[in-house]
Image (cartoon, rainbow, N blue to C red):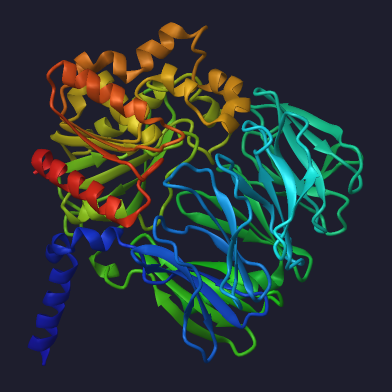
Amino acid sequence: MQKQILTALAASLLSGSVLAADIPLRDFFRNSEQSGFSLSPDGQSVAFLSPWESRKNIVVRRSGKPDQRVTAIKDRDLSGYFWKGNDRLVYVKDNAGDENFHLYSVDLASGETRDLTPFPGVRADIVDGLVDRDDELLVQLNKRNPEIFDVYRVNLKTGELKLEAENPGKVASWGTDHDGNIRIATETDGVNNTVLYRDEPGGKFRKLLTTNFRENFSPLFFTFDNQRFYAASNLGRDKAAIVEYDPKTGKEVKEIYARQDVDVSDLGFSHKRKVITCAEFETDKPGRQCFDEKSEALLSKLEARLPGYQVDIVSSNRDENRFVVRAWNDRTRGNSYLYDQGSDKLELLAELAPWLKEEQMASMRPVQYQSRDGLTINGYLTLPRGKEDAKNLPVIINPHGGPWARDSWGFNPEVQFFASRGWAVLQMNYRGSTGYGRNFWEASFKEWGGKMQDDVSDGVNWLTKEGIADPKKVCIYGGSYGGYATLAGITKTPELYRCAVDYVGVSNLFTFMKTIPPYWKPFLDSMYEMVGNPDKDKALLRERSPVFHVDRIQAPLLVLQGAKDPRVNINESNQIVDALKKRGVAVEYMVKDNEGHGFHNEENRFDAYGAMEKFFNKYLD
């Protein structure tokens, strides 16, 4: 008996380490069979996304009835949808990655799908889903002027669009009260932001306060009497806090929640009970602080039932007694559950990736190192299973996109894929990464390819000094700004990298500024402040544009690009590839004609990571 137990244990250990490399590439990047669960307002139906013709489509499950697929999209995965009443769903979809999203509604009874915003070259964004009004919602469209958005009230029964608020010319965002009336607007001149407010629906907007782009004051939602509102604010502080603001006096009434270590930027509320629930923040892992006893008790009960996992409530019915719950961690996409509070029943809806065994995945470890000028850089190190104590490992350096975003702890399919192939992965939140306060963010200004890049290089040097990395087997890979950091890395510090993969990355800061989407143009002046002005900072931008320094490149390069990318135009990739070819340097180049900023479709992801695997195998093994 003891021998059988030992044999089973040995088999288990082997399946978790040695055989991890045998997991097929597609298992990391294929779509879940069921994901994105959402409850109908009455709580009797659940919708989810499921592949059909290799594309995510919406399926509805009603008690006692077979699952009903309600969309038939073949060209591109649906990424987001929501319920409008118990018999209608709404979703947004673009064309091949152009990010000009259209708004669609699906009538579950008739099966009819309607394009509610059938305007070529126009982008639709939801302003307010109007949860109490099943037949209406508010949407912003840039159909009058491609650079600015007006708000329309959409009738989902008739398709009628009624102008709700015309943009006077500089409004970048809109906010509503709990009755669905537009009461707040934020306008920008590119450098300064002004919050506009009206005391009553339909009234005249007045200026509430003006901040420069370095400051953050973001209205979240109104108090439940619609007289004040909550906001995320770093005014007078380094780390953003949740505050209550009184528009009558123009002053912050009280601080709801703040931390000394990280920004607090989100606050939840109960639509039914009219109370604030929990504030959310992120240190090395997600965190929350609850103010409402019922929310705290519910989350504590679910966490006790699902130990070892991050537990999130992702959907509820209108009565707030049935919930869709997701449980996940750094080694699994996790499971979705249906929880009924009345019966205290927790029912499994789906495993999101049952083909990836949690025990075969690698742990993502929070790490810190010091930059050369004394900043603390937070990041994540993922070591291959079975090699947690190994030295001189091949490493992939993976700076995130944005750049004003951040890497987070959690399940990352590409990191897990790389680790399964025996490669360690370092992700770093270099200066400018969000969540660490205003000073850390401002330290990135005009430092693209400068100190921001030094933070990446310092991560490589830290790994080498710690003995984790084999200095002769370090490659760099990133997407968007991470693609720029990849190109900057192999031009600024070519001695550090054995190979490089640039995924939709910027190569020329001059042309990048000229080809941004029209609705980004109001923010161009602040971009000049944060990145550099093509006229005033010509020498700086030339020095920081990798395309002008291809003569320094020593590492083999793989470039991946979507042909319809509206953010990083395909010309950015064409320039670096053409410049290298003129020098007689071999470069691999993959372009997908039906993609935009990143590869969205499953078969394109398979191709991209297949090319990466072959590429990294060549230079890291």
In x, y percent, where is residue 492?
28, 19
In x, y percent, where is residue 356?
27, 68
In x, y percent, where is residue 29?
29, 58
Left or right: 51, with 37 as reference point: left
Nearest to the observer: residue 31 or residue 384: 31
Nearest to the observer: residue 253 or residue 60: 60
Quadrant in the rendering for residue 521:
top right
In x, y percent, where is residue 320?
68, 75
Left or right: 205, with 280 as reference point: right
182 shown above or below 452: below
Quadrant in the rendering for residue 192:
top right
155 shown above or below 619: below
Nearest to the observer: residue 161 or residue 400: 161
- Work out which quarter of the rendered image holds the N terminus and state it: bottom left
Left or right: 155, with 448 as reference point: right
Tag count in the figure?
Answer: 0
Can the viewer see residue 392 in this picture? no
Q: Residue at x 66, y 70 (%)?
A: 295
- Work out which quarter of the rendered image holds the C terminus and state it: top left
Quadrant in the rendering for residue 509:
top left
Left or right: 569, with 198 as reference point: left
282 shown above or below 251: below
Can the viewer see residue 138 in this picture? yes
Q: Residue at x 32, y 56 (%)?
A: 602
